[in-house]
Image (spheres, rainbow, N blue to C red):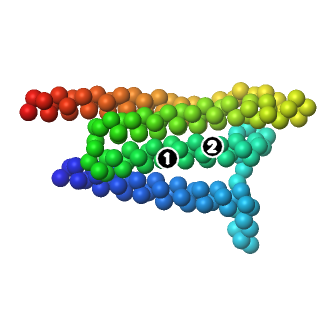
Amino acid sequence: MAQSSIAKTASRLRWAVWIVWGCTIALYILGRIGLDLGAIKVASRSELNEHAAPWWTADVVVLLLTVALYQLSRMLGAVAAGDHFSLRVSGAFRSFALWLLILALFSIAAPILAALFSGPNSGHRYELKFELHDLLTIGVTLILFLVARLLERARGIEEEMREIV
């Protein structure tokens, strides 16, 4: 009974991730196009620092987040299929945490990369700023790595229990 409940929840979460992410991607693309529907204007921009960051930084952030959410979807799909402590689940979960960590580190490094790629006469300053949400994201991803290790340990315990029975 509990396993079917976990599988249903994982399946619903997987659908929710894809629906929300699909809407987010659609709005981002509409914002990049600059859609104007009269009273509603959809716009996207990057605010990695107080100066407007180049367009490519926001695109890279969206790409990294897409890869991370794909890994989360893989994990939820495996849990929905009945794998709770398999290598597939822990590997996808670890990959999700890794891509989130890369995303957080990129968010910190993007202003410096933007200044480097813009050339010496562009007037950009080199900044290394740590914002609270970046530091929180890094902290959460490190905790997710711990949870991935716990999943691997649970898989080991489950295998030991099968051998005993």
145 up-or-down from 47: above or below: above
Return the disc, 2 or 1, that comes first in the chain's sequence: 2
Query: Which residue is outermost to the right?
Result: 121
User: Percent x, y for residue 159?
Assistant: 20, 31
Where is 79 relative to 85, above or below?
below
Image point (59%, 56%), residue name: 25
Query: Is the residue marked by circle 1 packed among few (<14), some (14-19), or many (20+) residues within 10 Å?
Result: many
Q: In the rendered view of the protein, which quadrant contains the C terminus?
A: top left
The amino acid pointed to by label 1 is Leu
Could you tell me which secondary element the residue under label 1 belongs to? helix
Q: How many marks?
A: 2
Which residue is painted at 74% across and 72% down in the image? 38
Residue 132 shows in this picture: no
Label 2 with label 1: CB-CB less than 8 Å:
no
Query: Residue tagged by mark 2?
Result: 61
Q: Is residue 52 shown left or right of residue 18?
A: right
- In the rendered image, is residue 142 in sight? yes
Compare residues 89 and 106 and report the one nearer the observer.
Answer: 89
Q: Give how far across and how far down residue 97 sits, in percent.
A: 47, 35
- Left or right relative to 15: residue 56: right
Q: Position of residue 70 (x, y in %)?
A: 48, 47
Seen at 74% across and 46% down, the residue is 55
